[in-house]
Amino acid sequence: MSSPWAVAVFVAATALSLGASAVLVVRLERVGARLGLSEALLGLVAALAADTPEVTSAVTALAHGQHDIGTGVVLGSNVFNLAALIGLGAVVAGGIKLHRRVVIFEGTVALWIAALAIAAVAGLITPAAALVLALAVLAPYVYVSAVPPSGRSALPLPPRLRSWLAEAVAEAVADGRHDRALLICGTGLGMAIAANKVPGVRAVTAHDPYSAERARKSNNAQVLTMGARVIAPETAKLVLEHWLNSEFEGGRSTSKVEKITAIDERYHAPRPECRPPGQQVPEVGAGR
């Protein structure tokens, strides 16, 4: 292929890729909502679609014996991704907050795949063995990502991991990354206790619409917990709707929430034993 044709094909392919990316970003969320796909799975699909041109370019170059180009595509694309996604994103948004537990979860999978790739290239293991070991981690990773939040309580997870996930969600709510959160376990009680250990979180267990509504209107609860073993699915949906459609009323409830916040700040201080002697905990009459 002559140079002018090669340039023309490159420009056309670039324009097509950019256009497809724009459509993907705009339409993917709507398609996912209609199909009932989780946000994590949508992100996985978007990442796969974005990386497909890089993968095909690298494979094509390597298949034609152009090892320098194939290696350059792999290294260059990943360096650019780090600079563009994190660097440019931070410049535009003014800063990026990373979820510590999400970084651990995603990073563990990424490091595992990277280690397998290095081992295969170095000849420590065969490519077939590396592929099997990669799929052993990627398969459950994709499965967990595909499960919607409402179905994650049914996953066969150890109690310690459930508590870890509850704390992860509560942290995201406490520092403002999410406005509200729904946590589900057997009774909802354990999740509420775990979430309330995080400073700034007001988590409540509610299995009836009125309690859920008052938890938001009177106590400004940002986290609702429910028990999968003690509430029917349709009732749970009704309770959740009442909670989501309610807003903090303020007024006379403001002083109650302020007292809750004061207690929270007092006992979550770096050195609570150094608080002034004789300081009294304010009386709290939160809730109705």
Image (cartoon, rainbow, N blue to C red):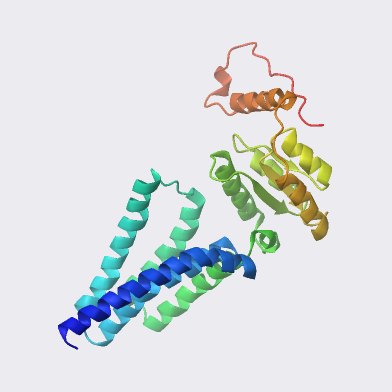
* Residue at x 63%, y 68% (from the top left corner): 34
Using the rendered view, name the quadrant where residue 213 is placed: top right
Q: Which of 217 and 145 is in front in this view?
A: 217
Say left or right for 221 vs 111: right
Q: Which of 131 and 220 is in front in this view?
A: 220
157 vs 117: above or below = above
Q: Position of residue 261 (x, y in %)?
A: 64, 27
Which part of the image, by quadrant, shows the C terminus? top right
Q: Position of residue 173 (x, y in %)?
A: 58, 43
Say left or right for 85 vs 192: left
Q: Where is residue 206 in the image (x, y as percent from the top left)?
A: 79, 45
30 vs 216: above or below = below
Say left or right for 276 vs 65: right
One can see residue 131 in this view: yes
* Residue at x 77%, y 47% (from the top left corner): 242
201 vs 119: above or below = above
Which part of the image, by quadrant, shows the N terminus? bottom left
Using the rendered view, name the quadrant where residue 16 is placed: bottom left
261 vs 113: above or below = above
* Residue at x 37%, y 48% (from the top left corner): 92
Q: Nearer the viewer, residue 161 or 18?
A: 18
